[in-house]
Amino acid sequence: MRDWRRDKLAFSVFALPATAWLVVFFTIPLVLIWVYSFADRGPQGQVIVALSLENYQRALEWIHLGIIWKSIWIAAITTVLCLALGFPLAMGIAFAPQRWKNPLLLLVILPFWTNLLIRTYAWIAVLRTRGFLNSGLEWVYDRIDGALGLIGLPDLLGPFQPLELLYNTPAVIIGLVYVNLPFLVLPLYATLEKLDKSYLEASLDLGASQWRTFVSVMTPLALPGIVSGTLLVFILSLGTYLTPDLLGGPDSEMIGNLIARQFGAARDWPFGSALSFLLLYAVFLFLWLRATVATRSKGVGV
Amino acid sequence: MSEVAIPSESVVVRRRRRRRATPLEYGRKRWLQIVLALNFLFLYFPIAALIAFSFNDSRRNVTWQGFTFKYYEKAYNNAGLHEAFLNSMIVAGTSTVVSTLLGTMLGLALYRYRFPGRGPFEGWVHLPIVIPEVCLGVAMLAFFAWADIPLGLFTVTVSHIAFTIPFVAVVVRSRMAGFDESLEEASRDLGANGWQTFWSVTFPYMIPGVVAGALLAFTLSLDDFVITFFTSGPGSTTFPIKIYSMVRFSVTPEVNAASTVLIVLTLTLTVTAMLIQARTGRKIDTHG
Amino acid sequence: MDNPKPIISIRNVTKRFGSVVAVDDACLDIAEGEFFALLGPSGCGKTTLLRMLAGFEHPSEGDILIGGQDMSDVDPNKRPVNMVFQSYAVFPHMSVARNVGYGLRVTGVPAAEIKERVGEALALVKLAGYEERMPTQLSGGQRQRVALARALVKRPKVLLLDEPLSALDAKLREAMQLELVRLQQSVGITFVIVTHDQDEALSMADRIAVMDSGQVRQVAPPAELYEFPNSRFVADFIGKMNLFAGRVAGAADGRVLIEIQGMDRIAVPYGDQARGEIGVAVRPEKIRLAPTPPTDGEIGLRGRVREVAYYGDESHVFLETAAGVITANRPNAARTTTPAVALGDELWASWEPADTLVLTE
């Protein structure tokens, strides 16, 4: 690495175009909505620049606070489920024979490369009333019904009632877990893969059971990966828009949808801007947390 | 008869065993294999079902009625889908070219130079990757309205470039992290100037990173829904936006077919580029 | 070796990884209280053998008995052995005291006893007062002591050490060699150490097993291994050796007559039968250099000095002879900067017939 003053020209040629682009088409828009967040809404929905905290106060009203709270809850449950599914997955890959590792990892990443919208849509097809899951259940149900008919109990169960699996909060959580699982598995896998296996062997050698080794040695040593992965999943879930929009019902709206609504039908840009910044501040907080854990764990020398 | 075969001790002891899993071969533990299988079922079942039923010869029923290509034909003849696909290609193509160029240069600058405020600058470059897409989308919408730029393919492309530049920069920079700087010094020592050194030593090493970055940019742009949703106007409907409007309230086999086309397209691109990257990466690494 | 009750019995153990045979039909008995070394070049299977003792690998064939008990179905955490890892594997997230106490905690030893035994173990490895330190605050040598204390506190029947000194610098390594021997004598536990460093094995172990390509080549006390290697491999691997290819020309009253190309026929004392092609070997320090031919009875060879390598305490002289280049070690006994031997000197190399080794393998 060299000092930029040693060749100013080359440095500017390399760094300046992208920087300029990001300033104009990223920073200025954000600053703009930050300014808007203190503005007033005109009668036709126009933005009247002002300096009021009214929009932030409105965000703390019960109805909006409920949505924020729900968003945090959904993100938290998603994170826990991702960890529960992702830890064994990451472990299975990290401890698989060498030649299996890359193919398995590829299998985890591959869905990530298919369109987010399509992946979400696929769950609609699975979960809807006439979806794959309900059809499968109906098939099983009919077989049971038929069997009962054979033993002289026809129509005992009545007609099949499809389960309401779509357009509710569980559907949103399923969709979020599905979309975000790789973001937890990858950092966790990276940590477990780098983990010196002799720590685990030492633990077993000293008389600890596999479970004790998992709790007392593997988990603490994998903590940087766990923290990094869970915080990432939490941030991504908290700010999601598409998943609740497609899979959720009226009562599973999240912050992202609330923001989008202000810029759409509600036409209240100042309020939407204030909500955006509340979400951004939360994201910054968790990013800062993640960075702190990352630098702290470097010292442990795992 | 002293020669009766009394097996020596070593022969008695010698016996073959079935290979048991060693304590850390968790991959051979049955419960973990089951968990892994369930995980992969969870990851692949929806997509696999979607693809399979794009070939199902039935509009309403989800039971299998026979194999057909007719929904592909229908999707192909859908003018709206056609136009959306074309738009997507224009946006993804343009934004990939620009963001790969700018992002690569930025990644290189981040790798090479020490300058005041470097840490915060790097954090700022990473921001578009981590902040919620919906925030970025509404900010862009507000910005274009404020600057009085009509929403259309231009605004979509500009936004896509903005959010893909950081990805390219990060990929290129992480590729360069493994670069042995003494190679550049050796080149200079052997009499090459800075320009020659860059093109003959540094750039060949960078290529896999640039390819990966470009591919990532293309896929992200092609796949993006949220930011496009806020920055597109009439006549600039991209493929995901079109599909969104189709799936909002109904599931039709045409959408399955169109989705399958997009899945196959991105997967083919990804896998090809991964293979290219793996090959060039290996070649360069062994030669370097 | 005549100990009726070996603490470790390795019986016809073979270990394959796919098509690679890491350990090939190894048989070893290790006596109680012994300091035993597994010595060999890297990839010879010594570490695999050690890991099978600890239970981290399972033999493909054969049995391992520890304390007379078959270990095939015993998990590592149930075995009466403990290991000091090459990387030490001192848990980075636990203090020294928690590291050393870990093995006791997980097996439910009462807290008061843990405290006492941890204190004793730390005193044993001279780390008293380091209880609350974290591993990152320790030097490599101190971390190794923690690993030792952590294993010894469990009072195992056997302590396994996997290349324990390889990560230390030369000075510290020598000090630790002596200390390990002292430690082993004071605790009386059987030590099995894996090393590729012959000096380490020779200076510490009571007995050494030399391994090569998965096979145990020779098991013997250090001096026997050095002076009476049983094969070309062992002769060449342990210390330096001048090796000649020879042919047996005959035998008479406890001696064999050997023909070596470029030399007169030599007569060497040798008890066993030998015929055909054999190896002849002599250690460099057994060879004397003189300007005149040797007196009667010694084997002599004339040559020209090609190279002299100076090591401070001694010099290695490379002599070009009709039988090839041979090496002779000359102690630098007198304090002088003028070399006693110069390049191009014509000298005689000579040694006692009894110092000549006949290698039939």
Image: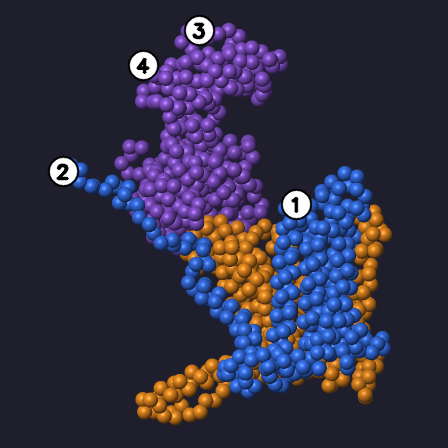
Chain colours: A orange, B blue, C purple
Is label 3 or label 4 in front?
A: 4
Looking at marks 3 and 4 on the same chain, the residue that comes earlier in the sequence is marked by: 4
Q: Is residue B105 above or below residue C286?
A: below
Disc 4 secondary structure class: strand
Q: Which residue is mark 4?
A: C252
Do discs 2 and 4 belong to a common subunit? Answer: no
Give me the residue at 45% from left, 63% from top.
B32
- Circles 3 and 1, Cβ within 8 Å, touching? The answer is no
Cα separation between marks 3 and 2? 60 Å
- Answer few, some or many: residues within 10 Å of disc 3's Cα (few below 14, many 20 plus, some between 14 and 19): few
Give me the residue at 35% from left, 54% from top.
B18
Cα separation between marks 2 and 4? 40 Å
- Circles 3 and 4, Cβ within 8 Å, touching? The answer is no
In the picture, measured across the screen, residue C264 lies left or right of residue B197, that is left
Disc 3 secondary structure class: loop
Q: Which residue is mark 1?
A: B287
Disc 2 secondary structure class: loop
- Answer few, some or many: residues within 10 Å of disc 4's Cα (few below 14, many 20 plus, some between 14 and 19): few
Cα separation between marks 1 and 2? 71 Å
Residue C131 in percent (x, y) is at 51, 46
Q: Is residue C219 above or below residue C269?
A: below
Mark 2 residue type: Met
Q: Which residue is mark 2?
A: B1
Cα separation between marks 3 and 4? 22 Å
Q: Which residue is mark 3?
A: C295
Looking at marks 1 and 2 on the same chain, the residue that comes earlier in the sequence is marked by: 2
Cα separation between marks 4 and 1? 62 Å
Q: What chain letter is assigned to the residue under label 1?
A: B
